[in-house]
Amino acid sequence: MKAKNPKSERRHSERIVTHKHAEVRKLVGSQKKLPVQVMNISDGGVRFICAIPFELGEELAYIDENHTTKAVARACKPLFKGFAIRAEFTNS
């Protein structure tokens, strides 16, 4: 499913709305894998819900069924249960 109004999107790549499950882990400190629910994903990044917060600029590994991708947390908003995290994929 595509985003509601693609003409108003600032992104260069298409955002796909999804509700799949994946895992993330912090690259510094505790490297425990954390289950997340993915809300949307694109070539440039991912938005997911996680039980713990991430600091802005914190590096993480996004792990799905196919591969692991490094990313940087760009936004973290508290929810009723958990946190909505927006992360940008990096090339390193």
Image (spheres, grey):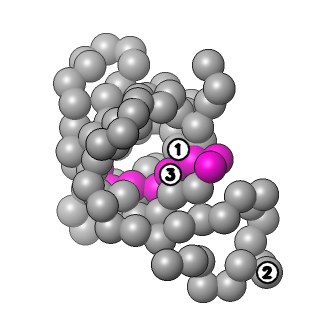
- The residue positioned 60% from the left and 65% from the top of the image is 15
User: The residue tagged with tag 1: helix, strand or loop?
Assistant: strand
Distance from disc 1 to disc 3, alpha carbons, whole Å, reads 5 Å
Q: Pointer 2: what residue?
A: 7
Q: Is residue 91 above or below residue 62?
A: above
Instruction: Work out whether residue 60 can be spotted.
Output: yes
> Of residues 83 and 91, which is closer to you in this image?
91
- The residue positioned 26% from the left and 19% from the top of the image is 31
Residue 38 counted in the magenta span: no
Q: Is residue 45 above or below residue 8?
A: above
Amino acid on which the number 1 mark rests in the picture: Ala
Q: Pointer 3: what residue?
A: 46
Amino acid on which the number 3 mark rests in the picture: Val
Q: Earlier in the sequence, mark 1 or mark 3?
A: 3
Observer-side mark, 1 or 3, equals: 3
**4 horizontally vs 70: left or right:** right
Q: Residues within 10 Å of mark 1 (few under 14, many from 20)?
A: many
Could you say where residue 2 lies in the image, as x and y percent from the top left?
57, 77
- The residue positioned 65% from the left and 26% from the top of the image is 91
Q: Is the Cβ of the residue at disc 1 closer than 8 Å to that at disc 3? A: yes
Distance from disc 2 to disc 1, alpha carbons, whole Å, reads 22 Å
Q: Which mark is residue 87?
A: 1
Q: Residues within 10 Å of mark 2 (few under 14, many from 20)?
A: few
User: The residue tagged with tag 3: helix, strand or loop?
Assistant: strand
Q: Which secondary structure dominates the residues rendered in magenta? A: strand
- The residue positioned 52% from the left and 39% from the top of the image is 73
Could you say where residue 71 lies in the image, as x and y percent from the top left?
53, 33
Q: What is the span of residues highlighted in magenta in the rendered image?
A: 43-50
Q: Is residue 39 above or below residue 74?
A: below
Amino acid on which the number 2 mark rests in the picture: Lys
Distance from disc 2 to disc 3, alpha carbons, whole Å, reads 19 Å
